[in-house]
Amino acid sequence: MIYALEARGFTLTYPGGSNSVFPALDFTVEAGETVALRGESGSGKSSLMLCACGMIPKNVRAEIAGELLLFGRPPCDYSQAELTRTVGMVFQDPETQLFCGTAELETAFSLENLLVPREEMAVRVREALETVGLWAQRGDSPEFLSGGQKQLLALAAALVQKPRLLLLDEALSQLDEFAADSMMTVLWRLQREGQTMLVADHDDVRCAFAHRVIEI
């Protein structure tokens, strides 16, 4: 069976470090499943996410051992275009992801890089922004959106790629209660629609919506 994500004795050590960031990991994430990755700050959740989306070791130096397979292949074996189509990621701080002039342009950015035809791009951008409830704000600058809206926009920018695996790295941890509820409403809908998700968080309540929880 080919899993969406599979770890086999997987470890990671940064340059100059003497110990692995986390103990050897063995887990699977099946297609259509929501899995929560639970652990305290510094436990290596973000590092694992960066490995899963191919940023480590492609863009960030680190020594890895064991195997981490993304739909049966090491993430580093994918081209950047393949990774963009396969994995979408939402970080803890949306400010690190948003840089375009409007919400619509932000959502379209990755599709432009993939040379998606304009007509298809328009349909997918509208669909992604409507999914997160931001179509009415499509012409607004991300600078003037609330913190919760910025995170929803970061989610739209990931969803527009139609990723086979969606990664969320503490994506709700900086949101107030109202914004977190809005985000969770979207995530519940995605789960019902069969979106495969790996959600890193330290909060038991936020992890509770997952089908399974992996401790790290």
Image (cartoon, rainbow, N blue to C red):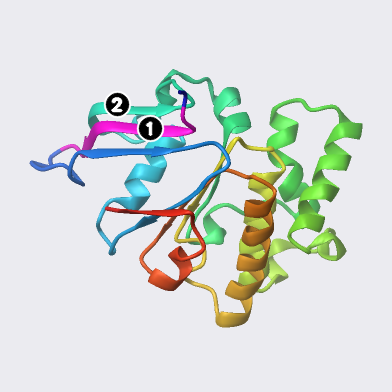
Is the stretch drawn in magenta largely helix, strand or loop?
Answer: strand
Return the mark for residue 6. 1
Q: Which residues are magenta?
A: 3-15
Asked whether 147 or 170 is in front, the reply is 170
Tag 2: amino acid: Glu
Q: Earlier in the sequence, mark 1 or mark 2?
A: 1
Question: Which residue is found at the position 34% from the left and 36% from the top?
Answer: 60
Q: Position of residue 52 (x, y in %)?
A: 42, 36
Residues under numbered marks 1 and 2 in contact, where contact means CB atoms less than 8 Å apart: yes
In space, the residues marked 1 and 2 are separated at their CA atoms by 8 Å
Q: Residue at x 38, y 32 (%)?
A: 6
Helix, strand or loop status at disc 1: strand
Position of residue 45 relative to residue 65, above or below, is: below
Amino acid type of the residue that numbered disc 1 sits on in the rendered structure: Glu
Residue 102 visible somewhere in the drawing: no
What mark, if any, has residue 67 been given in the picture?
A: 2
Asked whether 111 or 159 is in front, the reply is 159
Q: Is residue 175 above or below residue 24?
A: below
Q: Secondary structure at mark 2?
A: strand
Residue 200: image location, x then y, percent: 41, 56
Q: Residues within 10 Å of mark 2 (few under 14, many from 20)?
A: some
